[in-house]
Every structure is written in structure tokens, then in C-alpha cells.
Image (cartoon, grey):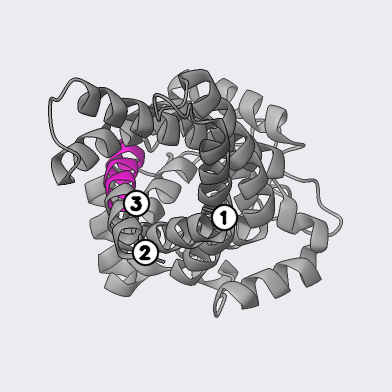
Amino acid sequence: MGVKGFVEGGVASIVAGCSTHPLDLIKVRLQLQGETLAAATPHHLRPALAFSSASLHLSPPQRLGPISLGLRIVHSEGVTALFSGVSATVLRQSLYSTTRMGLYDMFKQRWTDPETKNMRLSKKIAAGLIAGGIGAAVGNPADVAMVRMQADGRLPRAQRRHYKGVFDAITRISKQEGVGSLWRGSSLTVNRAMIVTASQLATYDQIKEAVLEKAIMEDGMGTHVTASFAAGVVAAVASNPVDVIKTRVMNMKVEAGSRAPYNGAVDCLMKTVKGEGLKALYKGFLPTVSRQGPFTVVLFVTLEQVRKLLKEF
């Protein structure tokens, strides 16, 4: 299928990413709630943790659920704030998802048994791991920009970055923090992408094949929705802990002469678990699964429709 697989995957991913962006933004804000730095001093506190008062003895801010947080964002920042960073989402899907979907399709064409027309589960997982890792490495700068833009509204007004768009964000981040900062958290991004792609694409193909083989449903919308929703749930459960750490590492602001809040993924993991408990690794899970479910459904339903439209080409 070659280039066609990349085009089909890219179009489907952009449609899915844009349509579920508000849920992704709420997920990011939830994952940053309650973020604490055990070793921090007043001079090392990041802006996101600074209170209007200089006192560090104030009671912690109220933790909100996804619906309450969504309503607060709309009330304090406006409805359009739910689409903050959507330009970064488009770029991220164009780079990351186009690459992973296209590569997975290439592996699928090569590794599918010509007799059964199916690919073994182990090969599906391997294809997903490889495709997801490569895609994440390509799309990491857009991922960093997206997280920064989505999280900007939670900072005090004087400390917000006010990015004009994804390219402004990437340019300013590289100038102020160095080009290498665009790949901050890349190991986490790659690990998460490998987990998501392997669980998401492998689960979808496996369930779809099982449904068709057992003649439970025909190859139509019902099968596509069922298989894709299940794939979204599996991907959310598998990736949420890595996603929480990735979000925190990417969002941290490192200023010249000051100590970084986290020294890396492992340090972030240890501080998060120590300060907030293991359950913090599933912070934002409800919006994650609420976003992964619809995202995966829109992704694969759109993909199947695009395949039909491009079948003759």
C-alpha cells in the first residue's frame, strides 16, 4: 500500500485528534493537578505551583473532576480555551500519527499470512511497538508544544507563555530553553507511543478479525465501532501512568540558573508517587479513557471510510 497507508492514517488521525482535543486538554490539566516537589524551596517552585500569597502554608487548592474542571476552564478562560493548542495537535497528528499508522500498515502488508489474510497477535504487537516508537521520535517537538499550550491557562496571568500558535511555541521554546528541550521527555513519549500503538492497533485488528471470523457481525460500522472502542479502553489503561509522567516532564519550566523541578522521568516518577501516592499515576484516567474511546472510534471509523474512498486509487 506504501504512501497510501500514510495518507489514510494521517487524515483519520487529524480528524480524530481535532474532534477530541477538548477532552485531551482537560486530561492534561487534571494530570498536573496536585503536582508537588518534595525537595523544592520557594525559589525553586515552578510557576504552576506558586500561589498568590508568598506563604507555603496555605491549604492546597481544591482538586476538581473532569466535568468541574471543564466548566471552570470555560468560565474563567472562555469556550475557545478548550481548543488551546489545537494547532499543535494538527502538527502532532501529521507527524506522529501519520508515521505510526503508515509504518504499521507497511508491516501489516509484509507480515500478514497470505493464506489466512491475518497477522499473528505477536507480530501485530511488534509492528505497533516499532511504528509507535519511530512516530513518537518524529513528533516529539509538536507534543511538547501541545502540552505547553494546553497547560498555559492554569498558570497565573503574569506567568503565562501566551504562545500564538504551534510554530511560535516551538520557536520560543528552542530559543529560550535550547533546541534539545523540544525532545524533553522523548523517552517517555516513545515509551507511551509504543504502548499506545501496540495496544490500540493490535487490539482493534484482533477484535475485528475475531468478530468477522465468528460471524458475530458483518464488516461494517458496528464491527468498527465495537473493535475501536475496546481498543481505546485497552490503550488508556496501559498508557495512563506513562502519560502522567510525560505530561509533567514536558510541562516543567527550566530557567537559567535555577534547578530543574525533575531530573528526568525516574525522578519525576519517584516524586509523584512519594508526594501523591500510586493512584496519582492514574490521575486524569476518566478523561483519558473518555478521550481515548471516542478518539479511537473516530480514528478507525474514519480510517475505514477513507480506505473505501481511496480503494480505487
Of all residues, the one furthest to the right in this rendering is 257
Crowding around mark 3 (Cα neighbors within 10 Å: few <14, some 14 to 19, many 20+) is many
Decide if residue 20 is in sight here: no
Span shown in magenta:
286-298
Q: Name which residue lies at 46% across and 59% down.
A: 154
Q: Which residue carries the number 3 mark? A: 299
Which secondary structure, mark 2? loop
Q: Which residue carries the number 1 mark? A: 2
> Please, is residue 193 above or below residue 90 in the view?
above
184 on left or right of 109 = right
| Viewer-nearest residue: 65 or 191 | 191
Which secondary structure, mark 1? loop
Q: Indicate the position of residue 125 as horizontal and vertical percent values.
A: 52, 26
| Viewer-nearest residue: 44 or 137 | 137
> Please, is residue 98 above or below residue 131 in the view?
below
Separation of residues labelled 1 and 2 (CA atoms): 13 Å
Magenta-drawn stretch, dominant element (helix, strand or loop): helix
Dot 2 amino acid type? Leu
Q: Which mark is residue 216?
A: none
| Viewer-nearest residue: 60 or 82 | 82
Which secondary structure, mark 3? helix
Q: Which residue carries the number 2 mark? A: 310
Of label 2 and label 3, which has the lower sequence position?
3
Crowding around mark 2 (Cα neighbors within 10 Å: few <14, some 14 to 19, many 20+) is few
In front: mark 1 or mark 3? 1
Q: Name which residue lies at 21% across and 41% down.
A: 225
295 on left or right of 8 = left
